[in-house]
Image (cartoon, rainbow, N blue to C red):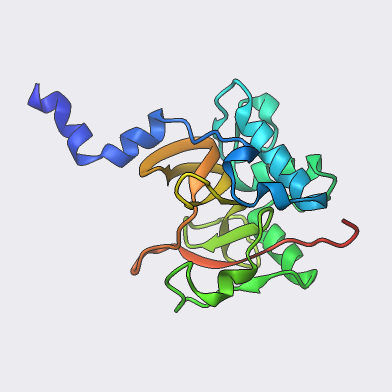
């Protein structure tokens, strides 16, 4: 019996990530939702609608079409933004460069350790969130961006900041999860390989 339980005791997050679907919420659960309009409302609506579909869209490296059963992080962002009427690049690195070249990127220095920092006062629902160091890309990308999600805002129940996208192992409500849906938005812990780079959204023409 102990032998069967030992893997669960040693690797609870891994087991949970493989077997637990990400969160699913509605716009009415979000503090900022009632004040959204235009492009940002379209993005949040499309993102939440995709999560609310009946099928569990698990994390699938290279996945960019829900019809194929799974999505990766940038594939999910590409799909949502395209549904909202934008024309984003496909990869997280290219999406980062796109936001930066449009003059919409708010870079966050590595020394910033909390979301209470004034740098985050301009963070809005619909903004793309970028990380580096979450894995080692091998596709020759020019910038070392490795992960992207979409900021949703704060949940009304406890004012917790949340994001949406596809992930294999990020948490929601303290439980590691796998696939497309809602996750807690938090900065990497001190000493983590992953680093948060910044956020933003091109809004020309919105």
Q: Is residue 10 left or right of residue 175?
A: left
- Identify the residue at image location x=53%, y=41%: 182
Percent coordinates x, y for residue 190 in the rendering: 34, 69
Quadrant location, the N terminus: top left
Whether 199 is drawn above or below 34: the answer is below
Q: Residue furthest left?
A: 2
- Count of residue discs: 0
Quadrant location, the C terminus: bottom right
Percent coordinates x, y for residue 99 in the rendering: 73, 65
> Closer to the camera, 141 or 34?
34
Whether 138 is drawn above or below 102: the answer is above
- Identify the residue at image location x=25%, y=40%: 11
- Identify the residue at image location x=54%, y=61%: 131
Whether 148 is drawn above or below 66: the answer is below
Picture quarter containing residue 143? Answer: bottom right
Percent coordinates x, y for residue 92 in the rendering: 64, 55
> Closer to the camera, 71 or 126?
126
Q: Residue furthest right?
A: 205
């Amino acid at each position: 019996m102990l032998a069967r339980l030992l893997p669960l005791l040693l690797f609870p997050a891994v087991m949970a990530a493989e077997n637990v679907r990400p969160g699913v919420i509605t716009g009415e659960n979000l503090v900022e939702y009632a004040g959204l309009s235009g492009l940002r409302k379209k993005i949040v609506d499309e993102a939440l609608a995709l999560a609310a579909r009946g099928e569990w869209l698990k994390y699938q490296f290279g996945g960019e079409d829900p019809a194929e059963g799974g999505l990766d992080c940038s594939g999910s962002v590409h799909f949502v933004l395209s549904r909202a009427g934008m024309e984003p690049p496909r990869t997280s690195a290219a999406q980062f460069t796109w936001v930066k070249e449009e003059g919409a990127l708010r870079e966050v220095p590595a020394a910033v350790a909390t979301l209470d920092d004034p740098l985050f006062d301009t963070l809005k629902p619909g903004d793309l969130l970028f990380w580096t160091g979450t894995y080692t890309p091998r596709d020759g990308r020019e910038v070392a961006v490795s992960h992207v999600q979409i900021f949703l805002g704060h949940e009304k129940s406890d004012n917790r900041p949340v994001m949406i996208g596809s992930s294999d192992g990020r948490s929601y409500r303290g439980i590691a999860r796998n696939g497309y849906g809602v996750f807690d938005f938090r900065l990497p812990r001190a000493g983590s390989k992953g680093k948060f780079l910044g956020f933003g959204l091109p809004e020309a023409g919105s």
